[in-house]
Image: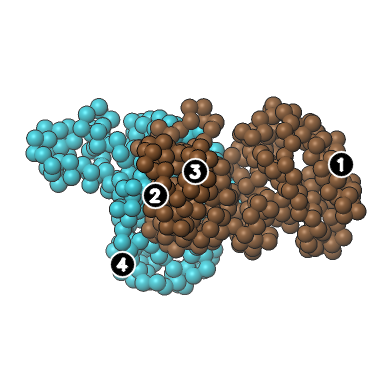
Chain colours: A brown, B cyan
Amino acid sequence: MTEARVNRIYAGIDVGGTKTMFCVTGGSGEILLLEQRSTAAHEAPGSFMAWLFAELAQLLAGIQLEVPQLAGIGIGFPGVIGDTEGCLTQAPSLPWPAEDIRPLIRRHYAGRIYLDNDVNLALLGECWKGAAEGKEHVLMITVGTGIGSAMLLNGRLYKGADFAAGEAGYMIVDAGQDRHRLPASGAGFGPLEAVASGSGITALARAWLAEAEARSASRILELAGGGGENVDARHVLQAAAEGDPAALSLMDRPLEHLAAAIASAAVLLNPQLVVLGGGVAVSGEYYMKEIRERAGKYLPFPVNIEQARLGNTAGAVGAAATAAAILW
Amino acid sequence: MTEARVNRIYAGIDVGGTKTMFCVTGGSGEILLLEQRSTAAHEAPGSFMAWLFAELAQLLAGIQLEVPQLAGIGIGFPGVIGDTEGCLTQAPSLPWPAEDIRPLIRRHYAGRIYLDNDVNLALLGECWKGAAEGKEHVLMITVGTGIGSAMLLNGRLYKGADFAAGEAGYMIVDAGQDRHRLPASGAGFGPLEAVASGSGITALARAWLAEAEARSASRILELAGGGGENVDARHVLQAAAEGDPAALSLMDRPLEHLAAAIASAAVLLNPQLVVLGGGVAVSGEYYMKEIRERAGKYLPFPVNIEQARLGNTAGAVGAAATAAAILW
């Protein structure tokens, strides 16, 4: 912490498809504000930024601050942001035209801006104030609607040749079958995501329910309030955690595939720690216990696997850390 | 190239289980000597180093040089060398006791020493004078007796938390089956190696030949001189390259598994280039063409896959490069 930073204020924003998290920190790392808003639907990035900065201004006003007083802003997006072009790509939930978004941000803020992928920033959040504090070699995998990953290698974010590193959802852990799970276009879900993400678990559960009406007595359906169309991954996870045999059986493949992917990534990267985040991974001890056991069976050396600690605030906290140049 | 380096001489040595390659370079990167010797069997690292330096001295004498004149020596070993302990571990072909080998080298040479894993140094060789010249993000996978890998990320070797990064032979690409291929101890071959390495291909071919004597008419047997016990991966690769149906069928799984592993590693790392080395990978265009096609089917973005160009000299050349501090 340099002397100069102490009196400065930084903002970190994590833009999600449905929710956007705002974090404001003081220069000593203290969190002054952490608030979530529903993400406004804007087809063009220009109007989206106007909305984003109006929200930020309003939140800052609540703590007697204004946007120009910020010493830096970090913003995370659910897609790939190239450091050179500034275009957001591979962001299904924000399908903007290919356009450099930096000038659009400049209309609202003249200071230091740092843009990155949301999973990269979530990893920095966990490295700053969460499960990976002080670590140098960390693999983070988020298992939510989709599957993403980020890597801190030798103490810095690793982004790859085209800022596309960390596409763990496309890892192949079941070669014979995975070939048939590839989306034709390269968009959509990768083979690992198709099985192991929240969406994958939901799809598996709905297919199973559709198969036989006799299954209507399942605990999964009970948790979903009785309608098969309401069933999603959360109900499967909860039923499995309670020991429901059908749910345990449904979870077998998603767990085994994610464990195999963690093992593959870990033998390649030899990280100090694998952090699992995202709604599925932080659903409870059942999931983490299964993943640890199953990954352990594939691994030639022990690998530490921990649950993310900052939940849905990690991205915004990491965005603030990077705005303050605490972590990159 | 600094001025000071120009008149200096460096040696790079790649110690293999059966062969050891010696490379001597001038400070401008010119190769003055490149010679292979059979590796002497020495159960203790001390007597091994005495042999190694005697060979080196003899080779240097041929070009009117002596060991003390060297400005640096790089040595690659087929195992893991920790930067902090200096012990060689996970080296089945050199099963030395856990002992810091640096003082043993110091008995023979007082200058700058750099020790590393042979695959790491082969990658540096390819980055200096081979297929990956000038690249910053490179994944190298060697497919020989076993499977190894090394990574240049952001222009530097990436070694992981415990110098164990790059254990690609343990990647999981066929989760259901791979669990049964894990060696009990964590020593032996990993699940990917068990199928896709030269040893894996040899084992597949021998099992197939043992299955039915009617197969004695196979081109594979012909190439091996008629005896099933002589068959190895080279015969299968050559027969497949000639279009022999049995060989093509035998190669299906090894190719598919390696392609899937390349895809998994590439989506994670987003390298500029994947370099394939080792006896199996450099066996000819048939192998590379199959790998490129099969990996392409798994990849959401195009990935450049090239054959290593320095063959069995890459490690020694890379060791010399690192001794000269040209690449790390």
Q: Is residue B42 above or below residue A267?
A: below
Disc 1 and disc 2 on one polypeptide chain:
yes
- Mark 1 vs mark 3, CA separation in Å: 53 Å
Q: Residue at x 17, y 41 (%)?
A: B208
Q: Label 1 belongs to which residue? A: A110
At mark 2, the secondary structure is helix
Disc 2 and disc 3 on one polypeptide chain:
yes
Q: Label 4 belongs to which residue? A: B42
Q: Given this view, does label 4 or label 3 mark the residue nearer the observer? A: 3
Q: Residue at x 38, y 53 (%)?
A: A245
Amino acid type, callout 2 = Ala
- Mark 2 vs mark 3, CA separation in Å: 15 Å
Q: Is residue A273 above or below residue B129?
A: below
- Disc 2 is attached to a residue of which chain? A
Q: Label 2 belongs to which residue? A: A246
Q: Badge 1: few (under 14), some or many (20 or more) residues near its Cα, within 10 Å?
A: some
